[in-house]
Image (tube, grey):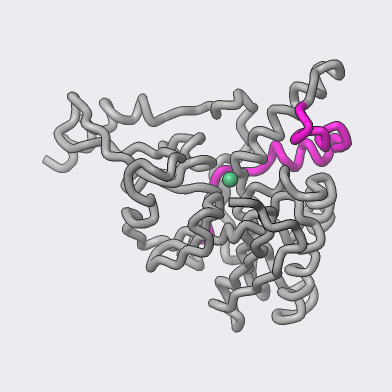
Amino acid sequence: MGALISVIWSLLIKPRNCVRRNLQNNPLPEVCHLCIEERHIAGQQVCVVGDVHGCIDELSELIAEAEKKAGHGKVVFVFVGDLVNRGPSSVGVVRKLRAMSSRVYAVRGNHDESAIREARKFREDNNYILSEKYFWVKYIENEDFAFLNSLPYTISLPSLNALVVHAGLIPGVDLENQILNDMTNMRNIVHQDDPFFPVPVLKGTNLHGQGDPWVSLWPGPQHVYFGHDARRGMQRARYATGLDTGCCHGGALTGVFISGPCSGEFITIPSKQPRAHA
Ligand SMILES: [Mn+2]
């Protein structure tokens, strides 16, 4: 019976969920869901870092602080995305992370996705008019562009039972069948009645006023580390940790160790950016 329901479910739901393109029409990365095996992080401590948004000084401080705790060259950093836009140096952040390549992983956020779109359009047509928010994409090199394009939608670390995504995930849906735009944008989940299915379908939304925080419905057992929700700020649920503490709005840049002797330790770098008006 379970198998039958699952087949019917996949026929009815999967074709709709299986969105193989993002809303920005960007090419998909070679790997949408990256898996970091235990051997890739052997002898290292993993530190997951919240939304950087071009805040290069705070990023440098956080990296230095993490290496002070765990040892120089002994930290693998995993970023929850939104590396760029808003802060003082998106190009600087991309270059710094590229320079640390073998010890840096990142998922893509909605700002990375839209920056890829703008960079792509500008590179196709140098007369393309960039809005002020994206002026910086004029200055990226081919390697910077390739770095942004390579960002996956999720990173899993099975040996740590951890999963990293920018915005959120719909419970009960395989990674391969998550909607790309949800993973970069959702904050809440709404329950939508579906005439073809006996129980309401869960849908992601980025609107704060609708539905429930997705974290409140995430059942584990994987622990999800995410960003994208500066308004809710630090979120610490049993199976999810939200790390967007609004660095670009004058808050802080937050990182947390998820392995090794420093496991569970947070690093908080106060922002140097002006406090945003509410
Ligand atoms: Mn975001």
Where does residue 115 sit, x and y in percent of width and height?
A: 71, 34
Q: Main secondary structure of the magenta part?
A: helix
In the picture, residue 108 is in which quadrant? Answer: top right
- In the displayed structure, would residue 123 be above or below residue 212? above
* Farthest-out residue, front: 277
Instruction: Report the residue at 82% width, 23% height from top.
Output: 123
* Farthest-out residue, left: 1
In the picture, residue 72 is in which quadrant? Answer: bottom right
Q: How many marks?
A: 0
Residue 55 as seen in the image, left or right of residue 22: right
Residue 121 as seen in the image, left or right of residue 259: right
- In the displayed structure, would residue 87 be above or below residue 104? above
Residue 211 shows in the view: yes
Residue 33 as seen in the image, left or right of residue 250: left
Instruction: Report the residue at 78% width, 32% height from top.
Output: 132
Q: Is residue 151 magenta?
A: yes
Residue 105 shows in the view: no
Where does residue 109 sit, x and y in percent of width and height?
A: 60, 44
Camera-side residue: 129 or 48? 129
Q: Quadrant of the N terminus?
A: top left
In the picture, residue 84 is in which quadrant? Answer: top right
Camera-side residue: 61 or 150? 61
Where does residue 163 sit, x and y in percent of width and height?
A: 49, 57
Camera-side residue: 251 or 186? 251
What segment is highlighted magenta in the picture? 131-158
Instruction: Report the residue at 27% width, 39% height from top.
Output: 191
